[in-house]
Image (cartoon, helix red, strand yellow):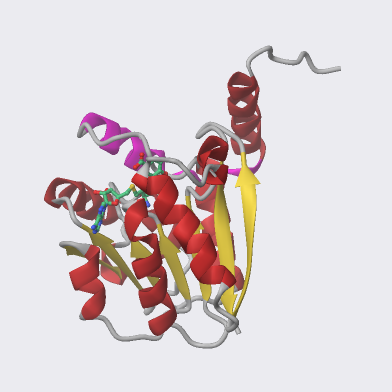
């Protein structure tokens, strides 16, 4: 019998460590190290979540991937590893320092040839893009989630997978009176997807080193 940790967060982190130890020998840990050294916030996806994005992109046979919210490129590296050498990942980042760190991390990972980091407000960057992308990962400012989702569907084809991060927020998503614009942005996103008949969607809650949160996964029909 495994000893239970009193603190659930501690137990979730311990299980994440076990998952990484058994199943993920290929964590691009240099990206996490470089991000910490550069003072970036520790808000990238967890290691198991990063590999999940990678596996989903491979399962989709993704050749063109769009990411909104790069930070230091941790999730970007996982996604870029999933596309073929002549494939492409386009990732959008408003903060020039984050974008610079991400470009260096992608070069160190030998993936710069297939990734374009576009610096600037994603709203403007998206308006200049044309599709179709095979997979879209939305992980930037949460109040913009509805606008980003609309752009993701514009840039899609039937079969495009759209994944959105941080849609549970320790259960805060349940509070219709929340004064947190991130929660309101995510609730508006659920409403937008609920009203969109051309999509099949679910949300999956997650626990782990990044606490209790979740992803929306939607498929364009
Ligand atoms: N996907 C990353 C984490 C992204 S964190 C990973 O898992 O490794 C969210 C990022 O979105 C931050 O770097 C932030 O600067 C960026 N961001 C916030 N608002 C934005 C906007 N309007 N346009 C583009 N990027 C934005
Ligand atoms: C925040 C953003 C994220 O993308 C995330 O995964 C965790 C936290 C934030 O803005 O606080
Ligand atoms: Mg996130």
Residue 64 in view in this figure: no
As drawn, 29 above or below 138: above
Residue positioned 17% across, 50% down in the render: 95
Q: Which quadrant: the C terminus? A: bottom right
Determine whether, in the image, residue 158 is placed left or right of residue 102.
right
User: Residue placed farthest to the left in the image?
Assistant: 96
Query: What is the x, y in percent for residue 83?
Result: 45, 71
Q: Quadrant of the N terminus?
A: top right
Q: Is residue 65 magenta?
A: no
Q: Position of residue 64 (x, y in %)?
A: 41, 77
Q: In the depicted view, which residue is nearer to us: 144 or 36?
A: 144
Q: Nearer the viewer, residue 151 or 174?
A: 174
**39 versus 51 height, above or below:** above
Q: Quadrant of residue 29?
A: top left
- Image point 63% across, 15% down: which residue? 7
Q: Is residue 132 left or right of residue 216?
A: left
Q: Is residue 98 left or right of residue 135?
A: left
- Report the front residue among 152 and 103: 152
Answer yes or no: is residue 17 visible.
Answer: yes
Task: Point out the stretch of residues depicted in magenta.
Answer: 23-37
Q: Is residue 166 above or below residue 85?
A: above
Q: Pick out the residue farthest to the right.
A: 1
**Residue 116 spot, x, y in % from top left:** 24, 68
């Amino acid at each position: 019998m495994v000893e239970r940790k009193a603190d659930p967060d501690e137990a979730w982190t311990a299980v994440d460590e076990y998952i990484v130890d058994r199943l993920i020998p290929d964590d691009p840990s240099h990206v996490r190290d470089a991000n910490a050294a550069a003072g970036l916030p520790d808000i990238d996806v967890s290691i198991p979540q990063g590999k999940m994005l990678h596996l989903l992109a491979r399962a989709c046979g993704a050749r063109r991937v769009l990411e909104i919210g790069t930070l230091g490129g941790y999730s970007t590296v996982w996604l870029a590893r999933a596309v073929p050498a002549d494939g492409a990942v386009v990732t959008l980042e408003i903060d020039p320092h984050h974008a610079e760190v991400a470009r260096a991390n992608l070069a160190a990972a030998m993936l710069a040839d297939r990734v374009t980091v576009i610096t600037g407000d994603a709203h403007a960057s998206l308006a200049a893009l044309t599709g179709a992308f095979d997979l879209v990962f939305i992980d930037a400012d949460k109040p913009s989630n509805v606008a980003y989702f609309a752009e993701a569907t514009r840039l899609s084809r039937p079969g495009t997978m759209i994944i959105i991060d941080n849609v549970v927020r320790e259960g805060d998503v349940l509070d219709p009176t929340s004064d947190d614009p991130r929660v309101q942005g995510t609730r508006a996103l659920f409403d937008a997807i609920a009203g969109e008949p051309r999509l099949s969607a679910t949300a999956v809650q997650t626990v782990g080193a990044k606490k209790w949160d979740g992803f929306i996964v939607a498929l364009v029909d």
